[in-house]
């Protein structure tokens, strides 16, 4: 097992095998916690690809492998990072971002069925929104033409009444019958009827167009609604968790659990003390640096060089 963890962490097994037991235990510890985020991202990538994005088996396996390998490289770089503050902070920042994204995407898998129900509500809301747009676009036109049709209907009815009275002799002329005045009123009635029919047909065509567009808006919105998008599913998840305290509390518990599991590498790297062998290696490196600095200083004094003033140029001149 130690050989496997040395392989994971990029350690030389032949060297590590000579370490004290406490150092070997630390390597085993880091190798074990390194596997946690790698396995989580592999499982998460497979389930996200297959269950949410609808990819095939091999596509899901390939996605899981790529994500696992990427997270393995990131987490191992954090474990192997030196004490340089800028590099350590950058890798901690990367690790934190990875942990947050991993927690959120894992929650997408855990709460998949609940999010699917919320996506159905989004679909209905999308249909209602598109139907409202169609209603708002046509309603004013329909109301306007309806008013014109109503006015034309009143004019037609009045022209018909005047014509009937003229035929019956009840009009002001008192002549009755199909006389010249009656023919004139018949012509007015025909014109009023044509105007009424024209406006009524326009209203009917507009109403038919409105019903068709309303029906197409519903169908197109349902057919084009994509419930596989990651961002809209995230939006659905957050609407779900903020809908009531129970959902929010359960989400926080799951998120915290997964987040801590993702952050274990950073936490252990930050708070685990150096082993005795690591401390010896670090002291040996410092001693080697000190010896090189001492050697350089002696050479500078021998050749009369000033290390702070054009050092490379001085060396070139000495060589020449």
Image (tube, rainbow, N blue to C red):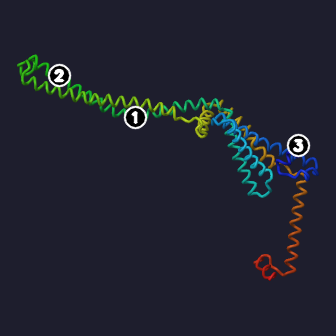
Residue at the location (91% across, 52% down)? 14
Q: Tell me which numbered mark, 3 or 1, is placed earlier along the sequence.
A: 3
Which residue occupies the extreme top position in the image?
168
Give percent across and percent down for residue 213: 41, 32
Q: Is residue 300 above or below residue 1?
A: below
Viewer-side residue, 260 vs 166? 166
Which quarter of the rendered picture does the N terminus lie within?
A: top right
Residue at the location (16% across, 21% down)? 161
Cα–Cα gap, marks 3 and 1: 70 Å
Q: Which mark is residue 136?
A: 1
Q: Where on the picture, by quarter, is residue 131?
A: top left
Which residue in the structure is indicated by mark 2?
160
Q: Is residue 120 left or right of residue 205?
A: right
Q: Is residue 123 left or right of residue 27?
A: left
Q: Count residues near mark 1 (Cα–Cα under 10 Å), then give few for <14, some for 14-19, many for 20+.
A: few
Say which element carries label 3.
loop
Which residue in the structure is indicated by mark 3?
1
Q: Where on the picture, by quarter, is residue 113?
A: top right
Q: Nearer the viewer, mark 1 or mark 2?
A: 2
Say which element carries label 1.
helix
Say which element carries label 2.
helix
Q: Nearer the viewer, mark 3 or mark 1?
A: 3
Q: Count residues near mark 2 (Cα–Cα under 10 Å), then give few for <14, some for 14-19, many for 20+.
A: some
Cα–Cα gap, marks 1 and 2: 36 Å
Q: Tell me which numbered mark, 3 or 2, is placed earlier along the sequence.
A: 3
Viewer-side residue, 76 vs 4? 4
Q: Is residue 98 above or below residue 147?
A: below
Cα–Cα gap, marks 3 and 2: 104 Å
Q: Is residue 148 above or below residue 262?
A: above
Give percent across and percent down for residue 44: 70, 38
Viewer-side residue, 152 vs 49? 49
Q: Nearer the viewer, mark 3 or mark 2?
A: 3
């Amino acid at each position: 097992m130690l050989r496997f963890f040395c392989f994971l962490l990029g350690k030389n097994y032949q060297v590590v095998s000579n370490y004290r037991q406490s150092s070997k235990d630390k390597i085993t510890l880091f190798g074990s916690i390194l596997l946690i985020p790698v396995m989580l991202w592999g499982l998460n990538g497979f389930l996200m690809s297959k269950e949410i994005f609808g990819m095939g088996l091999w596509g899901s396996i390939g996605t899981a492998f790529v994500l696992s390998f990427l997270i393995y490289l990131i987490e191992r770089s954090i474990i192997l990072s030196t004490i340089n503050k800028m590099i350590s902070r950058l890798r901690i920042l990367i690790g934190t971002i990875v942990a947050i994204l991993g927690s959120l995407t894992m929650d997408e898998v855990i709460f998949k069925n609940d999010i699917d129900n919320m996506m159905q509500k989004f679909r209905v809301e999308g249909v209602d929104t598109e139907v409202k747009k169609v209603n708002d676009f046509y309603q004013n036109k329909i109301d306007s033409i309806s008013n014109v049709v109503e006015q034309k209907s009143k004019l037609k009815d009045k022209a018909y009444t005047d014509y009937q009275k003229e035929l019956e002799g009840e009009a002001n002329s008192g002549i009755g019958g199909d006389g010249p005045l009656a023919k004139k009123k018949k012509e007015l009635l025909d014109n009023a009827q044509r105007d009424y029919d024209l406006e009524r047909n326009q209203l009917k065509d507009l109403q038919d167009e409105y019903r068709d567009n309303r029906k197409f808006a519903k169908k197109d919105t349902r057919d084009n609604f994509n419930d596989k998008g990651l961002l809209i599913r995230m939006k659905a998840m957050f609407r779900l968790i903020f809908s009531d305290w129970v959902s929010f509390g359960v989400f926080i518990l799951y998120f915290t659990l997964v987040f801590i599991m993702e952050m274990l590498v950073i936490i252990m790297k930050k708070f685990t003390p150096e082993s005795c062998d690591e401390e010896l290696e670090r002291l040996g490196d410092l001693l080697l640096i000190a010896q090189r600095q001492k050697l350089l200083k002696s050479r500078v004094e021998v050749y009369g060089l000033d290390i702070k003033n054009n050092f490379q140029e001085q060396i070139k001149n000495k060589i020449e």
